[in-house]
Amino acid sequence: MPFAPLKNDTFLRACWRQATDHTPVWLMRQAGRYLPEYVATRAKAGSFMGLATNVDFATEVTLQPLERYPLDAAILFSDILTVPDAMGLGLSFEAGEGPRFARPLRDETAISALAVPDMDKLRYVFDAVTSIRKALAGRVPLIGFSGSPWTLACYMVEGAGSSDYRQVKTLMYSRPDLMHRLLEVNADSVAAYLNAQIAAGAQSVMVFDSWGGVLADGAFQEFSLAYTARVLAQLQRDGADGRPVPRIVFTKGGGLWLQDMRALDCEVLGLDWTVNLGRARSLVGEGDGGKALQGNIDPNVLFAPPAQIETEVAKVLQSFGKPHADTQTTGPTHIFNLGHGISQFTPPEHVAALVAAVHAQSRALRA
Amino acid sequence: MPFAPLKNDTFLRACWRQATDHTPVWLMRQAGRYLPEYVATRAKAGSFMGLATNVDFATEVTLQPLERYPLDAAILFSDILTVPDAMGLGLSFEAGEGPRFARPLRDETAISALAVPDMDKLRYVFDAVTSIRKALAGRVPLIGFSGSPWTLACYMVEGAGSSDYRQVKTLMYSRPDLMHRLLEVNADSVAAYLNAQIAAGAQSVMVFDSWGGVLADGAFQEFSLAYTARVLAQLQRDGADGRPVPRIVFTKGGGLWLQDMRALDCEVLGLDWTVNLGRARSLVGEGDGGKALQGNIDPNVLFAPPAQIETEVAKVLQSFGKPHADTQTTGPTHIFNLGHGISQFTPPEHVAALVAAVHAQSRALRA
């Protein structure tokens, strides 16, 4: 596929632990409800899935935050639950209720019947990837993504969001054999899904292990990390343009397991705001096989006035310290992001203050 | 006050890092809705606060789990929100809604007006402590408790439970001066509250920092840990019977900050299920100034059949390893507990299996 040459490769360079002149920044859920233009497109689309399944709408909302802010990456507009939907679980979004599956997995029969879905059912996602990549015209790289096998399993068993994960953990502790079967299917599905995004034009891919942090020590390694590793092992290394595709793994609440995650075959680890970036850097960011680190400001900082936002940005940048600067070698690098998705209540002008502060302060930090 | 001599001091010995012949066990929220006899008493009381404010009912439900299970400690039946209620915020419990304050703190005027409440308004709590201690007749020790200054502040600013802590974090990031003022009042109130529980007969006290884990690294130390330390500095060391009162601090989601917590002037640290007990022991459980560790099985384990519960109990006990055994010195000890409160959906017979497994396996571990 003939894609335009990349003009801003700061994000990709930081993924590969190469020196950059500023710390790249993008925001999880940067295309979202805090932007009035998103709300307008969403209204035209009629529903969340109407938005996500329409290539033109998905392209439009993916690019909206880039029109406002000099972000260093774009991320596909989609939802992590497209994969179980394609498996036949019947996804819907009720107003004010969040996602819901009509047919959650609760017994051996349902789990035994589960299979890797026909990727043709997810064609709308891959078409959106190609459309967005073309619309970006090389401004910044495009990140594709998927939920992790465990995170998808949480929704697939609970049938909806949960505060206690009672159903999925009951299955896990009572019938670990069934949970492993479910996670195998999920891992192979996620790998196929991400590979199709890569083939369609994604320049980086990210696995969102949003619910890995609810697991107990031991269970995390067995039921989440092992299946994220199974996904990574199956991923294509090169993108549609022949360039290598860096892989990001983000486990919300996974700070205690960073050392375990160092062994993952990926380039970048995402961190939430509970993690001390300096400590994370010394644990997993240095030396051969070190990871680039992505994160980790508390999204609630964006409710404070710009002066306080600048102060908090400085704390995060200084916590990581000076990134690698030698252009001939690789070393510790930082990709600025939130520690979780941006809130729908965020004032858009505060996002401008954050992005400007990251760019200006991170240039000064290198000087 | 003439209290009966203590027959089972296993819990207190473990708090003081002294050798015991088994690992003591109690469960957070052990007096609660999973017990049909609790539901019956709650129905007689008419409401949650009707239960908590009536000395006879509070005594009855505190002792209910001890009638069923050979637990090694009792914990006062009450709620962490009694203190802000006494400050005048107007606590209520709507059916199915959780706690709610009629007058949450949202501005400088409200926070400036806040003061340590008259402890006479909390007399019902202290009367319950004395009544329960008498009713226990020395069977096991009685633990008193309070929410941490930060955790109380979350509820006081949000006005109810929250999924994003937007209000309280907006205040914290925008007006840290006001947040510090609020936390000072909370810390001094919590100290007075726990001291009154100690005077009334509590043999140990526990600070529940249930929401400390939602804070960013740096913010946790400044806005939660510092005020827990302020509480601890004001606590009476000796109880109503002249015996020293061990102090427990539990920060849900605080595993990343264990090394910071080692400096707290307390005897025991509570841990949630994300923490590796062996690693926690090596970080904060060994040597001079080491802490006893309390926790940390996932409450969802109790939904699995008894055989799996026994397997998971073994994992937790083995993760901690052999506790200190020399009766002449102190060293690493473990108090078995859940990593969070027990679920209302727990089958009571599964709790029996858990308690029996802890007692039997921990004796075997020492042999």
Image (cartoon, coloured by chain):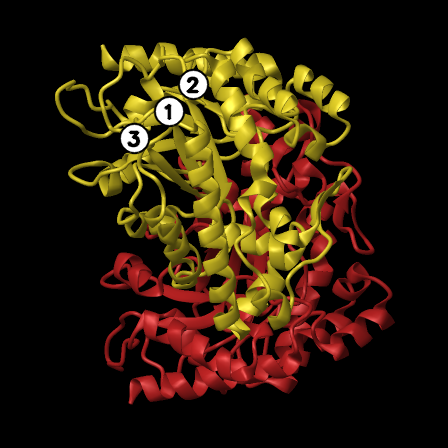
Chain colours: A red, B yellow
Q: Secondary structure at mark 3?
A: loop
- Asked if labels 1 and 3 share a chain, the reply is yes
As drawn, A132 above or below B59: below
The amino acid pointed to by label 2 is: Thr
For image coordinates 80% across by 70% down, the residue present is A42
Q: Secondary structure at mark 2?
A: helix
As drawn, A33 above or below B305: below
- Observer able to see residue A339: yes
Q: Of the residues under marks 3 and 2, which one precedes in the sequence?
A: 3
Residue B311's tag is 2
Residue B315's tag is 1
In which image quadrant can residue A321 be found? bottom left
The amino acid pointed to by label 1 is: Lys
Mark 3 highlights which residue?
B244
In which image quadrant can residue B82 be found? top right
Q: Are marks 1 and 3 in contact (CB under 8 Å)?
A: no
| Total marks in image | 3
Alpha-carbon neighbours of circle 3 within 10 Å: few (<14), some, or many (≥20)?
A: some
The amino acid pointed to by label 3 is: Pro
Looking at the picture, how far across and down is residue A120, in whole percent?
71, 53
For image coordinates 32% across by 47% down, the residue present is B258
Q: Are marks 2 and 1 in contact (CB under 8 Å)?
A: yes
Chain to which mark 2 belongs: B
As drawn, B262 above or below A335: above
Looking at the picture, how far across and down is residue A27, in whole percent?
55, 71
